Image (spheres, rainbow, N blue to C red):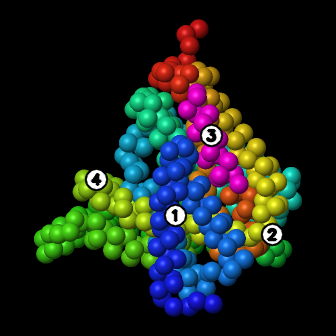
Amino acid sequence: MPERLPYVVMLLGGTTIAAVMAHAIWRWLRIPGLVGHILIGVALAVMDGNGGIMTDKTEVVFEFLGGIGIVALLFRVGLESNITEMLGQLRRATWVWIGNVGLSAVFGYVAARYLLGFELVPSLFAATALTATSIGISLALWRDAGVLDSDSGVLLTDVAELDDLSGIAFMIMLFAIAPIIASGNGDITGPVLQVGGLFLLKVALFVAFCVVFARYLEQPITSFFMRIEPTPDPLLIVLGMTFVIAAVAGWLGFSLAVGALFAGLMFSRDAESVRVDASFGSIYDLFTPFFFINIGLNLDPGALQYGLWIGAVLLVAGVAGKVVGAALPARRMMGWNGALLIGVSMVPRAEIAMVVMSEGRRLGDWAVPPELFSGIVVVVIATSIVAPLVVGRMLAANPSVNGKPPAC
């Protein structure tokens, strides 16, 4: 069994090239690249089962790169979130957000708990994962159609950002109370409230630190490092601070992903972040695929056959939750055609859903069993492929999506 460093480097190089090629092929097919990256991980897992290509060293390296990938992914989500504009649209987007998140959570929980027979904690993780949407998939279609800046496009962007941020918030809280719920030792209401309260206090202190850092410390620190080392661009300084913030969040029990998200939000208010975002592209493209490749690698082949059935049930619940939950409150603002377009555009699950399930998987089978993990992967792949095709046709059939409700 090969153990030398050149073998590890060769495997990483081949995987990186495969990820780039897969991304190009899927982009040509107008399918999100994450699908190809997950399939690369599945292919590596199959080859490992046949020939043992993954050694202890390569597994450690892939896990490390996947961790950097999740930091890069969530940092990008935070960096591209415009909190000021989102708060300005909050009144308009709130009901659509509450409707689609609420129904997605309820439908996902009922499907996992009562139709599929999972325990309480796994059902809560499934419900949390299904509340999130994918900002990038549908918004890219709206941007290509030239309607992302329309009233409907702005609403979709704000609701999608709220979905992802709330999905992370639910995950943070679930991490705190899941062990107590799983213990099932008598009346757990008191312990849940106590642990949940202490956890929320830590969250509040961490958020306060992030706000103070963003308002009073970030710009002076960045300017200082730029004066003493004007080149390269500020990206390296930003990345260094992001890793520190992510590590602090991990030590506090929030996970690296949460810290990276907050770091992105902190830097999103700085005009210099435009340069950072432009420079960040290559780093994002290098590391983020390894997060999804690890998802494919960690799929249990024995659980995959059950995952197809589980994924089919959760897929129905996930689609219904987004379409019905978003369309009903949105119809008053834009009529049924525009509301259904918003609902279908919210269907894709991708990055945040897999972050929730991957972080839950780290807790163990009691939190996210392999069959449930496989089922959510099926949901991600199916919605990432099918939903863009449907949204594209609906956009072509609705050239103007600034729609107001029809006059009575």
Q: CA distance from mark 2 to mark 3?
A: 28 Å
Q: Mark 3 or mark 4: which is in front? A: 3
In the rendered structure, the answer to whether residue 220 lies left or right of residue 387 reads left
Q: Which residue is mark 4?
A: 274
Q: Nearer the viewer, mark 2 or mark 3?
A: 2
Q: Residue at x 49, y 75 (%)?
A: 12
Say which label, 4 or 2, has the lower sequence index. Answer: 4
- Quadrant location of the N terminus in the rendered image: bottom right
Structural distance between the alpha carbons of marks 1 and 3: 25 Å
Disc number placed over residue 60 in the picture, else none: none
> Is 357 covered by the magenta stretch?
no
Where is mark 2, residue-wise? Answer: 302
Across and down, in percent, residue 276 comes to 29, 59
Residue 159 seen from this side: no
Q: Which residues are magenta?
A: 378-394
**Callout 4 amino acid:** Val
Instruction: Give the residue at x 25% y 53%.
Output: 271
**Quarter assignment of residue 119:** bottom right
Q: Dot 3: within a 10 Å radius of its alpha carbon, few (fewer than 14), some, or many (20 or more) residues?
A: many
- Please tell me whether mark 3 sits on a helix, a strand or a loop: helix
Residue at image mark 1: 18
354 versus 347 height, above or below: below
Q: Secondary structure at mark 4?
A: helix
Contact check, label 3 and label 4, Cβ < 8 Å: no
Badges 4 and 2: C-beta atoms under 8 Å apart? no
Q: Which residue is mark 3?
A: 387
Contact check, label 1 and label 2, Cβ < 8 Å: no
Q: Earlier in the sequence, mark 1 or mark 4?
A: 1
Q: What SS does tag 1 mark?
A: helix
- Residue at the location (68% across, 58% down)? 377
